[in-house]
Image: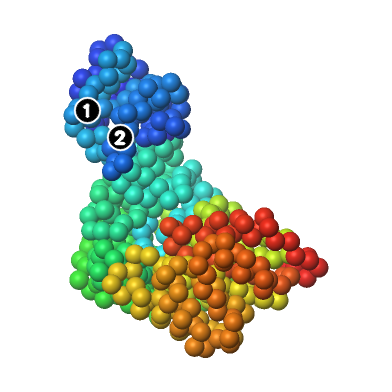
């Protein structure tokens, strides 16, 4: 984490007003949350739509804050406490992160994309950790606040940082990449997430390509070469940095083939540029592509294949993404963090290919943020669900009801159920569950379907004699 004197902090954020007697005090880390701030941290109060962090300065001090940045337009408390005045505390947070990153002797990998960026981050961090001291974005800290906090959490002796960058409009990744200054930039794919704001997939691709603005002049750009939108927009991209692509199609620099997928993970073969076999203990063919992006990056940083194989076995996964939850006599495939048509169809494909279960159930909620065609996209997913590979389909939410309505055309009567609320959903699932069932749970984040996962796990007990 950042450890600097207050005099240095004042200079890094172009601040003013720090009293002379405080200049040599040293902070150890930063926090924007007075509830979780730790001793000797720098408090950075932010102003949001429904809160003002400046109102919680006393709580921050009580918890051990050593000093605080302070918006010069806010009334300054009459306290004998180190304050550094800035024009805007959010911009000061970002500026501090930028300055700190530039002071570190570190290599940074920036990752963005519509789907898979968090999993790619987790896999890559594990591979890099086999050779280098590595840190990564924690959880989903991938926005204009989370990314600066991630950068400021880096230890001075960290050698590699894997930074996830999210966006839902133009300009956001431009900001994040200017802070992180990546040596490698990765785009995992272009999907439907954020169509509500960006309108077209081409615009989504252009927003993701902003990551190149901060890429080192001697850096590397890696992207999914099978993605039709990326292939289209890359024709107009002119950069001097090295480019590598990955995928299954001919012409990719890193090509792969799926060998086998089951409940234990996926086996796949790297066929280009060298032939190597791998096993990744993660679910779903789509994770082969995430692994390929990680392999290409790891090889760029001279990590041998034997360490890459080792790294695959020690991935620390971020929760609620293709998470296999073993309950009493049944299994839940918890993918409740987010949902869009591409990721939902990939999750269904994972469910289709999981063997050894007596019953397969899909629980699908609304896919949000899809823009003006959101109803049609839900309808299209409903038409594509295979009734031969799922026993029951449950939906929740007004948009997901369109999935159900169009799935009913192909499913037998009473196998597709639209539920009014979570209580109705849970009770409806309980009525049809068999021992050794597997249940996919997937929806956009605001639906909070992890509550359904938790309730089923707590309330349902089935015989275990046939459970894998």
| Mark 2 surroundings within 10 Å by alpha-carbon count, few (fewer than 14), some (14 through 19), many (20 or more) | few
Q: Which residue is mark 1?
A: 74
**Does 36 sit left or right of 26 as displayed?**
right
From the viewer's side, name the closer residue of 320 and 16. Answer: 320
Which x, y percent locates residue 202?
Answer: 25, 71
Taking the spot 43% from the left edge, 54% from the top edge, the residue there is 301
Decide if residue 22 is in sight here. no
Which x, y percent locates residue 82?
Answer: 30, 18
**Quadrant of the rendering where the N terminus is positioned:** top left
Q: Are marks 2 and 1 in contact (CB under 8 Å)?
A: yes
Q: Is residue 18 above or below residue 51?
A: above
Which x, y percent locates residue 207?
Answer: 26, 62
Q: Is residue 333 above or below residue 45?
A: below
Decide if residue 368 is in sight here. yes
Q: Which residue is mark 2?
A: 52
In whole angstroms, how far apart are the C-alphas of marks 2 and 1?
10 Å
Q: Is residue 155 above or below residue 351?
A: above
Question: Which numbered marker is on residue 6?
Answer: none
| Mark 1 surroundings within 10 Å by alpha-carbon count, few (fewer than 14), some (14 through 19), many (20 or more) | few
């Amino acid at each position: 984490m950042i450890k600097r004197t207050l005099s240095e902090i004042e200079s890094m954020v172009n601040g003013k007003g720090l009293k002379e007697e405080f200049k040599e005090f040293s902070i150890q880390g930063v926090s924007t949350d007075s509830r979780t701030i730790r001793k000797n941290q720098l408090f950075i109060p932010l102003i949001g739509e429904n809160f003002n962090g400046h109102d919680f300065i006393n709580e921050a001090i009580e918890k051990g804050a050593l000093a605080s940045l302070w918006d010069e337009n806010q009334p300054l408390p009459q306290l004998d406490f180190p304050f550094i005045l800035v024009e805007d505390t959010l911009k000061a947070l970002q500026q501090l992160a930028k300055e700190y990153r530039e002071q570190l002797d570190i290599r940074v990998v920036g990752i963005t994309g519509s789907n898979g960026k968090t999993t790619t981050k987790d896999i890559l961090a594990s591979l890099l950790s086999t050779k280098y001291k590595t840190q990564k974005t924690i959880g989903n800290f991938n926005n204009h606040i989370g990314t600066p906090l991630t950068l400021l959490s880096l230890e001075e002796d960290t050698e590699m940082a894997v930074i996830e960058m999210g966006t839902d409009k133009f300009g956001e990744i431009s900001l994040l990449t200017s802070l992180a200054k990546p040596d490698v930039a990765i785009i995992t794919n272009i999907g439907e997430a954020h169509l509500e704001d960006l309108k077209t997939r081409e615009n989504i691709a252009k927003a993701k390509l902003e990551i190149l603005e901060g890429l080192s002049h001697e850096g590397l750009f890696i992207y999914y070469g099978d993605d039709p939108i990326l292939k289209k927009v890359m024709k107009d991209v002119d950069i001097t940095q090295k480019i590598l692509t990955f995928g299954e199609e001919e012409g990719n620099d890193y090509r792969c083939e799926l060998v086998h997928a089951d409940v234990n993970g996926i086996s796949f073969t790297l066929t280009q540029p060298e032939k190597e076999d791998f096993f990744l203990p993660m679910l779903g063919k789509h994770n082969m592509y995430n692994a390929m992006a990680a392999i290409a990056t790891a090889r760029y940083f001279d990590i041998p294949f034997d360490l890459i194989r080792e790294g695959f076995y020690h991935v620390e996964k971020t929760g609620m993404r293709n998470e296999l939850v073993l309950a009493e006599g049944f299994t839940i495939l918890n993918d409740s963090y987010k949902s869009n048509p591409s990721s939902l169809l990939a999750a269904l494909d994972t469910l289709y290919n999981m063997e050894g279960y007596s019953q397969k159930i899909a629980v699908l909620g609304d896919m949000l943020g899809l823009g003006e065609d959101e109803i049609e996209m839900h309808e299209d997913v409903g038409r594509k669900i295979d009734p031969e590979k799922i026993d029951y389909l449950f939906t929740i939410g007004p948009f997901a009801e369109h999935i159900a309505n169009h799935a009913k055309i192909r499913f037998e009567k009473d196998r597709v159920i639209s539920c009014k609320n979570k209580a109705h959903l849970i009770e409806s699932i309980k009525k049809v569950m068999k021992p050794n069932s597997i249940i996919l749970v997937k929806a956009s984040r605001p639906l909070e379907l992890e509550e359904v996962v938790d309730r089923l796990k707590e309330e349902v007990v089935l015989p275990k004699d046939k459970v894998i």
